[in-house]
Amino acid sequence: MKNRKKILLIISILILSLFTLAACNAGDAAKTDKTKLRIVLDWTPNTNHTGLYVAQAKGFFAEQGLEVDILQPPEDGAVPLVGGGGAEFGISFQDTLAPNNASENPLPVTAVASVVQHNTSGIVSLKKSGIDSPSKMTGHTYATWDMPIEQAIIKKVVTDDGGKFEDINMVPSTVADIVTALQTDIDAVWVFYAWDGIAVKVKGLETNYFNFADYGKELDYYSPVIIVNNEYADKNPEIVKKALAAIKKGYEYAIENPEAAAEILLESAPELNGEIVKESQKWLAGQYIADAETWGYIDSERWDGFYGWLYENNLVENEIPRGAGYTNEYLPK
């Protein structure tokens, strides 16, 4: 009798062990079953990217069955990497995508979501320079990237405002530190307000700023956007939709919880200035969606309007067809 009980006990232990092992294997399988994706940034981490880091930290990607790596960009940016299949997603800008979209042999990438609804870039200068409108750039020094589209935008806003573009002292310079640059012989710098515009404010500089979108509807282009590799999207439309659903949730969290979102970004990029990140995050909370119905939506009129203006001003080699280069079809309904 004792032997029988002992045998039954051993069998029970063996059965329990098998169930435990099966459960562990199932758990391991679940861990490795996630779809792996890569998202390459356009620049070093900043508040344009917060929604991505929130989606990663809060498990929004995991909820969609995704395992995501957020990558730093190569020297030539995200577009060649995504177009070449080195990453499924990336961050880019409508203006820098223009030459590709106008090319006869474009890299296979498409914008699938706007990160910030309106163009929030413009010109910042010290208040003492008196550049409180585009025309007043005349006679002052501007740090230019020496790019045709950039200079055409400056020319448009200055000329339309009654100034003389040819009288601006254009100094080729890639400004890395706006605060320092404005305290040298540079009078005016193109900035993305959410970062450098906030930075000069945090550092206590008295400045003037004007936003390009206020000086022409055609300048209210999308900056930045999320791009996807076309071949990947064609073969995996549901994965693209899942990724954007998680990212959307990340940006919505950043809108509702800017301080907590700022902390998440700082955990991933502790080298950033915490005060700038927090102030930038508060400001962007009102800009990610702004007046759109939902995060990520790209308005066809504004997208096509900007590309039409580029073609009219000979800034792209070929006319970009209406509706080319972007889609809203993967956004959550």
Image (spheres, grey):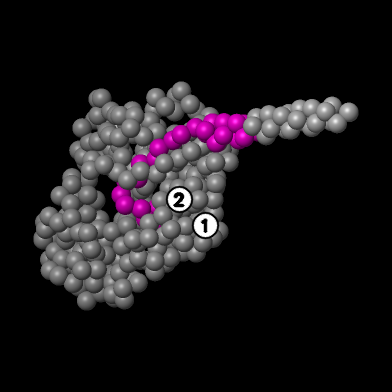
- Where 116 sits versus 39, above or below? below
Outermost residue toward the top in this view: 235
Instruction: Depth check: give the residue in front, 102 or 231.
Output: 231
Q: Earlier in the sequence, mark 2 or mark 1?
A: 2
**Taking 298 as reference, is 30 left or right?**
right
Please report the residue visible at 28 percent of the width from the left and 59 percent of the height from the top: 191
Image quadrant for the N terminus?
top right
- Residue at image point 39% right, 53% down: 48
- Left of 28 or right of it: where is 214? left
x then y, percent, for residue 324 = 37, 31
Q: What is the tally of numbered marks visible in this picture?
A: 2
Q: SS class of the residue under badge 2?
A: helix
Q: Could you say whether the residue bearing mark 1 is in a helix, strand or loop?
A: helix
**Rendering coords of residue 162 (x, y %):** 21, 60
Q: Quadrant of the C terminus?
A: top right
In the figure, residue 95 lies in which quadrant? top left
Residue 268 position by quadrant: bottom left
Residue found at x 24% / y 64%: 178
Residue at which label 1 appears: 255
Q: Residues within 10 Å of mark 1 (few under 14, many from 20)?
A: many
- Asked if residue 31 lies left or right of residue 212, the reply is right
- Residue 53's disc is 2
Residue 250 makes an appearance in the image: no
What segment is highlighted magenta in the picture? 23-48
Q: Tell me the amino acid under the disc marked 2.
A: Tyr
Is 316 on the left-hand or right-hand side of 305? left
| Mark in front: 2 vs 1 | 2
Residue 240 versus residue 143 in the image, above or below: above
| Residue 157 can be seen, yes or no | yes
* 126 in magenta: no
